[in-house]
Amino acid sequence: MTAFACPSCGFDIDLFIPTPDGRTIWSDVPKLASIPFHSAVTLGDHSGTPVVQQDPFSPPALAFAGLAKTVEALLPT
């Protein structure tokens, strides 16, 4: 997950301190996507309607779509 976009002003708020590459076990693992924190994701989880169906052009929906394309490209044909 990436930053949280404030629903009032739109300012991005980092909820987690970034870990330097030298201090993480994930430094050799490619990052597939960055999914932003967004209330629509939580609301979709509770209602059973994914964020991509609620608002397909919202930042989290676009991030999930990008993740799906990245994973699809990595799959063997």
Image: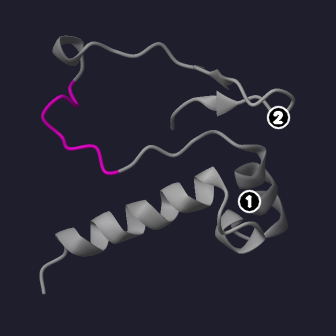
Percent x, y for residue 2?
51, 34
Residue wearing tag 2: 7
**Tag shown at residue 76:** none
Against 40, residue 15 (above or below) is above
Q: Secondary structure at mark 1?
A: helix
Q: Is residue 12 left or right of residue 16?
A: right
As shown in the figure, which amino acid type bears the numbered disc 1? Asp
Percent x, y for residue 5?
69, 32
Percent x, y for residue 76?
12, 80
Q: Residue at x 50, y 61 (%)?
A: 64
Q: Residue at x 20, y 26 (%)?
A: 25
As shown in the figure, which amino acid type bears the numbered disc 2? Pro
Residue wearing tag 1: 45
Q: Are marks 2 and 1 in contact (CB under 8 Å)?
A: no
Magenta: main secondary structure: loop
Cα separation, mark 2 vs mark 1, equals: 18 Å
Residue 51's quadrant in the figure?
Answer: bottom right
Percent x, y for residue 43?
81, 55
Q: Is residue 34 left or right of residue 60?
A: left
- Magenta segment includes 52: no
- Magenta segment includes 30: yes
Q: Which residues are magenta?
A: 25-32
Residue 52's quadrant in the figure?
Answer: bottom right
Instruction: State the quadrant of the C terminus.
Output: bottom left
